[in-house]
């Protein structure tokens, strides 16, 4: 084990990436507050070339109006292992063949959902607010939301639960 690994052992992921806590508008970090806007993706495979060019232009306008806006794409993450483990344990203790078959179907269903979710993507705009008080962050959050929406993107600022 290297010295760096020993030094970092016991440090949480939040500490390593500098997350302090949730705020009313986003996530507070050691480097300012982050605001997250989830964007409903557009299926460009069904759009004409003109429509795609327009979407690109709209994105350029958003990035021109908010030049420090960051874009991120993440895979959907749903964990089904605890549920599948519970169902397997339940199946092992079950005596009824009909109930066992239903539990097997539930496990197959969870496997199918997990496979489908692995290919789901979430697109987000991320804005950093450095050195701002909560009122300024609130105003910036609303301003950015308005700019993004005015350019035709279906989005909303993510809530704590999201």
Image (cartoon, grey):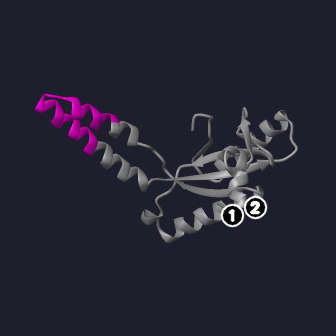
Whether 18 is among the magenta residues is no
Residue displayed at 82% across by 34% down? 134
Give the answer, above or below, for where 39 lies relative to 158. Answer: below
Dominant secondary structure (helix, strand or loop) of the stretch shown in magenta: helix
Q: Which residue is mark 1?
A: 60
Under circle 2, the secondary element is helix
Under circle 1, the secondary element is helix
Q: Which quadrant would the N terminus be assigned to in this image? A: bottom right
Residue displayed at 71% across by 50% down? 16
Give yes or no for contact between labels 2 and 1 (Cβ–Cβ under 8 Å).
yes
Image check: 159 left or right of 130?
left
Give x and y (percent) for residue 156: 61, 42
Residue 82 falls in image quadrant = top left
Residue displayed at 19% across by 35% down? 102
Give x and y (percent) for residue 60: 68, 64
Q: Which residues are magenta?
A: 86-108
Residue located farthest toward the front when viewing the structure as drawn: 1
Give the answer, above or below, for where 83 lies relative to 112. Answer: above
Give the answer, above or below, for where 88 lies relative to 9. Answer: above
* The one of 7 and 136 positioned closer to us in this rendering: 7
Q: Which residue is mark 2?
A: 64
* The one of 43 and 107 positioned closer to us in this rendering: 107
Whether 96 is among the magenta residues is yes
Residue located farthest toward the bottom when viewing the structure as drawn: 49
Give the answer, above or below, for where 3 lies relative to 50. Answer: above
Give x and y (percent) for residue 91: 22, 34
Q: Which mark is residue 113?
A: none
């Amino acid at each position: 084990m290297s010295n760096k690994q020993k030094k970092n052992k016991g440090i949480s992921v939040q500490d390593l990436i500098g997350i302090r806590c949730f705020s009313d508008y986003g996530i507070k970090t050691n480097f300012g507050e982050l605001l997250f806007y989830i964007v409903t993706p557009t299926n460009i495979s069904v759009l004409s070339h003109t429509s795609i060019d327009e979407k690109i232009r709209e994105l350029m306008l958003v990035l021109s109006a908010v030049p420090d806006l960051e874009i991120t794409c993440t895979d959907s993450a749903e964990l089904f292992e605890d549920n599948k483990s519970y169902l397997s344990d339940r199946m092992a203790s079950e005596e009824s063949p009909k109930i066992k078959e239903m539990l097997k179907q539930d496990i197959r269903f969870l496997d199918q959902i997990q496979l489908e979710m692995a290919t789901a993507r979430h697109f987000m705009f991320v804005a950093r607010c450095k050195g701002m008080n909560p009122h300024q962050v609130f105003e910036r959050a609303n301003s950015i939301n308005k700019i993004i929406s005015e350019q035709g993107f279906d989005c909303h600022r993510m809530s704590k639960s999201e």
